[in-house]
């Protein structure tokens, strides 16, 4: 069974949500909000403590060896 809810949002937030939804292929703001809730509630990736420690070590090593310059350069390298 589905339940309908009503949600009041500030105009600025609704306008931003409309723009985001359109830009990212959602047919409506409602569809965007449903997907956002679905991802937040059910598809959130779980990261273990071990994985977080590994990421921290990688960051420290990258900083120590100056393996990247700016944040933009880092993300550019990560996207490859």
Image (spheres, rainbow, N blue to C red):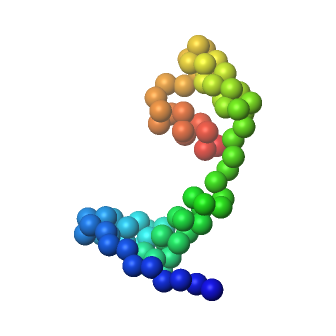
Residue 34 image offset from top left, x and y in percent? 53, 72
Q: How many marks?
A: 0
Residue drawn at x 47%, y 36% is: 72
> Along the horizontal axis of the image, is 2 left or right of 14?
right
Q: Residue furthest bottom?
A: 1
Q: Position of residue 74 (x, y in %)?
A: 54, 33
Left or right relative to 59: residue 73 = left
Above or below 58: residue 23: below
* Residue 58 visible to the viewer: no
- State the image quarter where residue 12 is shown: bottom left
Q: What percent of the width, then of the height, locates residue 67?
A: 59, 22
Instruction: Name the residue located 49 percent from the left edge and 25 percent from the top edge.
Output: 69
Residue closer to the observer: 9 or 31: 9
Q: What is the residue that sits farthest to the top in this orientation?
A: 64
- Compared to residue 79, the image places residue 17 above or below, namely below
Give x and y (percent) for residue 41: 60, 60
Task: Examine the rendering and report whether any part of residue 27 can be seen.
Answer: yes
Residue situated in front as seen by the camera: 10 or 64: 10
Q: Which quadrant is the N terminus positioned in?
A: bottom right
Q: Please say if 12 is above or below 31.
A: above
Question: Which residue is nearer to you in this view: 38 or 25?
Answer: 38
Q: Quadrant of residue 80?
A: top right
Residue at (44, 70) in percent of width and height: 21
Q: Is residue 18 left or right of residue 44?
A: left
């Amino acid at each position: 069974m589905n339940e309908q809810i009503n949600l009041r949002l500030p105009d600025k937030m609704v306008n931003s949500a409309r723009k985001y939804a359109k830009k990212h292929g959602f047919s409506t703001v409602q569809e965007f909000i449903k997907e956002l809730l679905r991802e937040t509630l059910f598809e959130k990736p779980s990261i273990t403590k071990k994985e977080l420690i590994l990421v921290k070590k990688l960051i420290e090593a990258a900083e120590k060896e100056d393996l990247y310059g700016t944040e933009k350069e880092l993300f550019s390298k990560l996207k490859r």
